[in-house]
């Protein structure tokens, strides 16, 4: 069992607050932290928020350095610049404001137009903050507004134009619109969070008067947990695959014993209905790009039959990988990761049986195994509240991802019927675009830079702002690759960023999605880089390989390309390629760049 | 709860908040004697005590507390 279960749903706020110093000491014993600079601009006291947020981030292997604005100086720090903040060079700016920071509510004499103007004025203040902070090229996390604890207009408060609740609802709508427009702006939905834990638990008048905390002590861990989910998602630490046990997890009963007609699923009974809701939730995740896998101790035939139940929401085809056998579950889970080609730390495993959970979490500790208990009613909450699959945006590529995997199955099947691998590649009728970044793809590019781990030479992460800047900067060669084949569109799957200086092109980033491995796409990318270099009269390319836990598959990529090694420190290597007489290396992919 | 029991539990809370297993407090212990006992940690202490003992201090009461002794006296009164 995870030593830091305290920091997972259901978190224990009082224990976290009380033991925070010893928890921090324990967390610091872990290995492989990534350092990130996080600036907190507060409209109320933030000291304890910083302390607790630190715990949640350490738990996700992010070691935060903090900058904290002085009390209630969020507006000044954001607008008038601050040497210290500039020096700090934030990766994330978190703006902790809430209803206590609303400048002025309407009074009863004011007309509809006055109220409209007041909403506009309030919003403009935040817009100018976000605008001004955009110079830091970092992600901004902004609270929306919680409701005030008292409302002198009673229920009318939420629909009369003079009501505070009404005012806040309008502000929140405007915030949502802005967050949809501004790429690097993410909302921390404290309006939802405060309802979830209950407004009377969320706000503590005594603590507000005494210490100017705009939320109660016990709400602080909930808030910090919520912020950490967004930060994890920004840095690509969210999970990608949900692995489900079957008997008493996807349906009630044991299909091998009870038979297809004996299992509980559907709407006939309360128990059946609760399993149906769980399946519906899993299906929703699948529809937005989370991969589903099954891992069950069962005969394959029986297990598969369970999803042929007329009331079953999930179908056998919904599972990208389906393991039903009598082997130990941790072995099956390793196989699932290999089959789908994703890291073990991208997996979440749900099983009603504590023994199975134990064996998986002890044998493969990087798999997330929430302590879901044995009542299906709680399973969704463990997935939902832990934020394993927290998205920061919904991209068409995510929604289609499962289709790629399915197409991939067909490709793999064909592979075995060809005489040679080359013949197979030709048969795929591949067409690629290898072009300079364009604005419609910047979201996807940022996302890929933050979540690609295996085929990634430097594992350099970029914020949306940085990618936007690179995209319009002539000192960079920045190429994305898209690949289509006869089975379907793989989408945008490769990115290379080269910094041109001193007559050389330094490759800061080279990555490719694993779904197009061994297709020769990397050669098509190299050809395009060389072409763009030559156009700039650059004849030397410098490549860097920075070893990470996951990128050993590309340690010899530059060697394969014909680069010559010029330096190595530890496991990191530097390579050089003279391109004055370069010949194109791509043989199997048609390039279409018009 | 006897005064001594309250005292022992308060000491445990002090040990957790300041992360010092061997910390010993007595009636006259005050914020001058514990280096980390600043106004922010004071809030953390009070709120941990409120949670542990399921009591609440009124705003005025907190102003009066000069040392651990006066705090424990007030708590014993509330716990009656």
Image: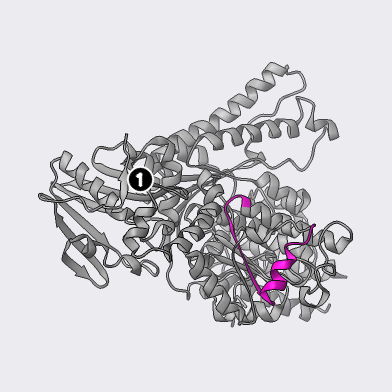
Q: Is residue A220 visible?
A: yes
A286 vs A437, left or right, is right
Residue A50 location in percent, x, y?
54, 57
| Residue A312 covered by magenta stretch | no
- Mark 1: give few (<14), some (14-19) or many (20+) Cα within 10 Å: many
Question: For numbered disc 1, what is the local secondary structure?
Answer: strand
Residue A54 location in percent, x, y?
53, 62
Residue at 62% over, 76% down: B15
Occupied quadrant, residue A250: bottom right
Residue at 27% over, 71% down: A571
Which quadrant would the N terminus of chain B be assigned to in this image?
bottom right
A40 vs A453, left or right, is right
The correct choice, above or below, for A243 with respect to A411 in the image is below
Residue B19 location in percent, x, y?
57, 74
The correct choice, above or below, for A237 with respect to B13 in the image is above
Q: Which residues are magenta?
A: A287-310
State how the image is colored.
Answer: one colour
Which quadrant would the C terminus of chain B be assigned to in this image?
bottom right
Q: Residue furthest left?
A: A580
Q: Is residue B50 visible?
A: no
Question: Where is mark 1, residue-wise?
Answer: A432
């Amino acid at each position: 069992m995870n030593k830091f279960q305290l920091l997972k749903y259901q978190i224990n706020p009082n224990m976290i607050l009380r033991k925070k110093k010893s928890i921090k000491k324990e967390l610091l014993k872990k290995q492989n932290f990534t350092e990130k600079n996080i600036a907190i601009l507060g409209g109320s006291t933030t000291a304890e928020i910083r302390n607790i947020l630190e715990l949640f981030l350490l738990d996700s292997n992010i070691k935060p350095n903090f900058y904290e604005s002085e009390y209630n100086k969020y507006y000044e720090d954001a607008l008038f610049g601050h040497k210290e903040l500039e020096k700090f060079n934030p990766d994330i700016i978190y703006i902790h404001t809430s209803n206590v920071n609303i400048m002025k509510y309407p009074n009863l004499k004011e007309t509809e137009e006055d109220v409209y103007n007041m909403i506009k004025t309030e919003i403009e203040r935040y817009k100018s903050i976000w605008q001004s902070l955009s110079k830091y090229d970092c992600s901004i996390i902004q609270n929306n507004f919680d409701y005030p604890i008292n409302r002198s207009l009673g229920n009318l408060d939420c629909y009369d134009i003079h009501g505070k609740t009404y005012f806040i609802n309008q502000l929140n709508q405007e915030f949502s619109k802005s967050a949809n427009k501004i790429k690097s702006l993410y909302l921390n939905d404290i309006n939802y969070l405060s309802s979830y834990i209950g407004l009377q638990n969320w706000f503590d008048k005594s603590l507000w008067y005494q210490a100017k905390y705009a939320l109660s002590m016990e709400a602080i861990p909930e808030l910090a947990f919520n912020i950490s989910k967004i930060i994890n998602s920004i840095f690509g630490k969210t999970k990608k695959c949900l692995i489900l046990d079957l008997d008493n997890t996807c349906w009630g009963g044991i299909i091998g014993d009870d038979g297809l007609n004996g299992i509980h699923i559907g709407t006939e009974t309360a128990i059946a209905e609760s399993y149906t809701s769980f399946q519906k939730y899993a299906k929703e995740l699948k529809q937005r790009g989370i991969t589903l896998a099954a891992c069950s101790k069962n005969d394959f035939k029986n297990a598969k039959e369970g999803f042929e139940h007329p009331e079953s929401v999930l179908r056998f085809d919904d599972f990208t990988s389906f393991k039903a056998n009598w082997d130990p579950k941790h072995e099956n889970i390793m196989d699932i990761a290999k089959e789908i080609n994703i890291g073990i730390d991208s997996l979440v495993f749900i099983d009603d049986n504590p023994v199975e959970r134990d064996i998986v979490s002890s044998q493969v500790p990087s798999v997330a195994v929430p302590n879901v208990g044995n009542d299906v009613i709680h399973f969704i909450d463990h997935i939902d509240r832990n934020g394993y699959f927290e998205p920061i945006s919904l991209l068409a590529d995510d929604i289609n991802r499962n289709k790629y995997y399915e197409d991939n199955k067909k490709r793999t099947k064909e592979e075995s019927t060809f005489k040679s691998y080359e013949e197979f590649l030709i048969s795929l009728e591949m067409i690629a675009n290898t072009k300079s970044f364009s604005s419609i793809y910047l979201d996807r590019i940022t996302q890929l830079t933050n979540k690609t781990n295996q085929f990634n030479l430097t594992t350099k992460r970029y914020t949306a702002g940085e990618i936007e800047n690179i995209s319009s900067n002539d000192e960079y060669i920045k190429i994305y690759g898209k690949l289509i084949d006869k089975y379907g569109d793989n989408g945008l799957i490769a990115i290379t960023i080269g910094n041109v200086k001193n007559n050389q092109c330094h490759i800061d980033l080279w990555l490719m999605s694993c779904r197009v491995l061994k297709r020769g796409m990397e050669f098509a990318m190299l050809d395009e880089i060389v072409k763009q270099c030559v156009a700039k009269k650059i004849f030397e390319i410098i490549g860097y390989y920075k070893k990470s836990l996951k990128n050993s598959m590309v340690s010899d990529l530059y060697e394969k390309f014909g680069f010559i090694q010029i330096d190595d420190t530890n496991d990191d290597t530097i390579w050089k390629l003279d391109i004055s007489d370069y010949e194109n290396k791509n043989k199997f992919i048609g390039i279409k760049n018009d | 709860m006897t005064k001594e029991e309250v005292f022992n539990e308060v000491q445990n809370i002090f040990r957790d908040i300041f992360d010092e297993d061997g910390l010993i407090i007595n009636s006259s212990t005050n914020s001058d004697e514990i280096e980390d006992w600043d106004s922010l940690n004071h809030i953390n202490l009070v709120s941990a005590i409120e949670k542990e003992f399921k009591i609440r201090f009124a705003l005025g009461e907190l102003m009066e507390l000069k040392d651990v002794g006066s705090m424990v006296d007030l708590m014993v009164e509330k716990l009656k």
